Image: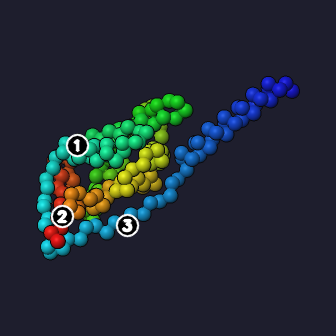
Amino acid sequence: MNKWKVAFFILTGAIILFITIIFYLATSPSEDVQINSKGVTVSPTDSVLLVEATADDIEKMAMNYLQKELANSPLPIDIVVDKSINLNSELTAFGVTVPFSMKFNPVVTEEGNIQLKQDSVNVGKVNIQPSTVLKLMNDAVAFPEWIIVRPNEEEVYVELTDIKVMNGARVRAKEVDLENNRVLLEVIVPNE
């Protein structure tokens, strides 16, 4: 057989193997991330402030925090908050950039954190499982420790109680009602 034919078949086999490995890694289930949130304890000396915000306020705060935290991220992330929370970005694979968007519905946990349950995903014209998109996004972006991407559960967990704001104050969610454009947060300020 001609040496060029052999080289062609070896190169073709290597490319197919590479694509198969990438596909396997992208679609294989990720390890489950356990949430060990204890919430925020309020001592009798603490001051508790109730803050009411709109969806627009939450969108601005989220983008501000994410821009600081993800300044060196290879993926541009845009968040739009209206009747749901929409995350827009793009994936690059094999030199092709594909835009994607995910829609989440927020659920307030007992501890005052927020579970963003994935409602829908749109990846260009490609039909990809939502868990695969979340896994790829989690692998590509170094999220801050208070954002936990859980591909197997198709959710993003936001540990508000782990975000430290000025002078050791803590935040916890009380209500997220995007249909009525109302978000209630508690800010616990230690007085000791």
Q: Dividing the picture into quarters, in which one does residue 56 lie?
A: top left
Q: Tell me the SS state at disc 1.
A: helix
The crowd level at tag 1 (other Cα within 10 Å; few <14, some 14-19, many 20+) is some
Three-letter code, disc 3:
Asn
Question: Mark 2 sits on what residue?
Answer: 188
Q: Residue 146: x percent and y percent?
A: 34, 56
Q: Residue 101: x percent and y percent?
A: 37, 38
Q: Could you tell me how far apart the alpha carbons at marks 3 and 1 are, in whole angstroms?
A: 28 Å
Label pair 3/2, CB-CB below 8 angstroms: no
Q: Tell me the SS state at disc 2.
A: strand
The crowd level at tag 3 (other Cα within 10 Å; few <14, some 14-19, many 20+) is few
Which numbered disc covers residue 60?
Answer: 1
Three-letter code, disc 2:
Ile
Q: Nearer the viewer, residue 161 or 176?
A: 161
Question: Mark 3 sits on what residue?
Answer: 36
Q: Tell me the SS state at disc 3.
A: loop
Which numbered disc covers residue 137?
Answer: none
Q: Dividing the picture into quarters, in which one does residue 20 lie?
A: top right
Q: Could you tell me how far apart the alpha carbons at marks 1 and 2 are, in whole angstroms?
A: 21 Å
Count of all numbered marks drawn on residues in the image: 3
Q: Residue 159: x percent and y percent?
A: 31, 58
Horizontal side of 149 relative to 167 (left or right) equals: right
Label pair 3/1, CB-CB below 8 angstroms: no
